[in-house]
Amino acid sequence: MAKERIGIMGGTFNPVHLGHVQIAKYAMQGADLDRVLFLPDGTPPHKTGIVSATHRWRMVCVATCLDKGLVPSDIELNREGITYTIDSLHALHDQFPKADLFYIIGADTLMELHKWKNAEQVFPLCTFLIAPRVLSVSSREYLDEKKRLISLGASFENIDMPVMDVSSTALRESMTSGGVSPFFPPTLQEYCGALGLYGMPRRVPQAEEWFSRLFSDLTVKRFSHTLAVAYTARNLARNHHVDPLKAEIAALLHDCAKCMPLSEMQAVCRKHALTMDALTLASGNLLHSIAGSYLAASEYGVEDPDILRAISCHTTGKVGMTKLDMVVFLADKIEPTREEYPTLQKVRMLAPLSLERAMLASLEGTAAYVKSGSHPLHPQSMRTMEWLRTLPEARG
C-alpha cells in the first residue's frame, strides 16, 4: 500500500488568508498530496503582537472548511511553551507513522531555514515544498543557499504556481486603515470586524462571548455560513437604509439553534408555547428559526423585538415582513459561500435592487423546488408569496 502523503502548512496565520489556501491547493495537486494540515503556531519564538491563539484557530477552521483535503491541526496550539517545527514534525510522525511529510514554505523562508532550531535534524523528517515568492536576495544567493542546504540533507520540490503577492502583514495594515483585500474572504472580514481585531473598531459588543458559544454549538461549516450571512446582511442593510448593526446581529444569531437535536428544539418550543404548528414542529429546518429567536433572547441577551422577529421568520417568511426581516431572509439565501441552486444568481442580482422582488423570486424558486419533491410548501411561505405579489415594489 502506498504511503499517505501529507502536506504541512505551518505559520502564525495572523491572519490566515486566501494566499495560504491557494498555496495549499496548488501543493496538493502538484505534489499529489492526500491532504494538507494547517498548523497555527501556539507561541512562535520569533513573533510578538499576534492575536490570541483562539481567534487564529477559529479563522483557520473557517478558511479551510469548504475545501476537501485542507485540515486544521491544533497540535502546536496544545503544546506548552515556545513552538518549534522540529517538535511538530516528531509529533506528526508519531501520529502518522506510515506517512511521508511535506512541509510547505515560501522561497523566502528557504533563506531562513538555517536559523530554525536544530535545522539539520529537521531535514530528514520532511521534504520541503517551495512556493514562489518575491525574493530580497539575488537568484545566485538563493541557489547557492539551496545547494548548501541540500548538502546538509535537505530535500526540496518546487510548487508550480503563480507568485501570490499577499501577506498577513499587508492584510493587517489594510484592516487598520479600513481597506479590504480580495485575499481576505467575507467570512474572515466579518469575524475580524465584529470582534474589532487588528485595529478595527469593534462592531458587535457581545462578539467575544457570542462567537465562543456559536463556535462551540455549531459545526465549523455552519459557523462559517453564519459569518457569511452576517457579512451579506450588513452590506444589504446599508444598501437599503436598514440599520446595519441590527441586521448583523440578527444574522449572527439566525442559526444559533440550527445544530440542536430536533427533540430539544421541540421541547423548547412546546415548553414556551412558541408554536403549535405540526408541520413546523416536525422539521428542524423550519423549527430552528423559532427556537433560535427564543435562544437569542434567553441565552444571548437580545431584547430588540425587531432582531428577534427577523430571526424567527428567516426560514418561511411572514406576511408583513419589514425590510430588516427581508434583509436577513435574503442574506441567508445569497451569502457568498452558498452552493449553487437554480435561482441563486437571480436572487443575488435582485437583492441590491429590490428586497421585495428578490423575496418573491426566492420564494417562487423554493415553491418550484418543493413542488418537484414530496414536501409541500409551508403555508406561511405561500401566504408570504401571495402577499408580496400585492406589493407594487415586488413588480418588475
Image: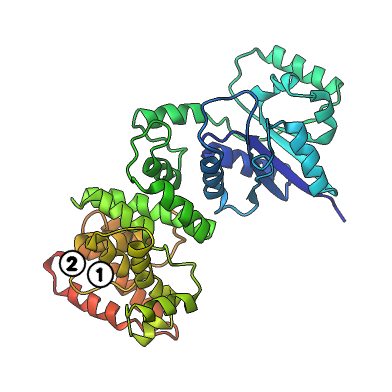
Q: Which is nearer the eye, 36 or 193?
A: 193
Residue 396 numbered tag: none
Determine whether, in the image, residue 219 is placed left or right of residue 44. left
Quadrant (top left/top right/bottom left/bottom right) for the C terminus = bottom left
> 216 above or below 343?
above
Q: Are marks 2 and 1 in contact (CB under 8 Å)?
A: yes
Find residue 284 and report its horizontal and vertical position in percent: 44, 75
Q: Which is nearer the eye, 394 or 58?
A: 58
* Residue type pointed to by label 2: Ala
Find residue 101 and report its horizontal and vertical position in percent: 78, 41
Mark 2 residue element: helix
Residue 93 lies in what quarter of the image?
A: top right
Give the mark nearest the N terminus, 2 or 1. 1
Residue 189 lies in what quarter of the image?
A: top left
Local packing at callout 2 (Cα closer than 10 Å; few below 14, some 14-19, many 20+) is: some
Q: Report how far apart the C-alphas of labels 2 and 1 lie in the structure.
A: 7 Å
> 8 above or below 35?
above
Quadrant (top left/top right/bottom left/bottom right) for the N terminus = bottom right
Picture residue at 86% right of the left edge, 26% below the top: 153
Determine whether, in the image, residue 278 is placed left or right of residue 141. left
Picture residue at 11% right of the left edge, 67% below the top: 392
> 111 above or below 217?
above
Find residue 37 and report its horizontal and vertical position in percent: 67, 45
> 343 above or below 142?
below
Find residue 393 and report its horizontal and vertical position in percent: 14, 64
Determine whether, in the image, residue 239 is placed left or right of residue 49. left
Which residue has dot 2 on it? 394
Which residue has dot 1 on it? 360
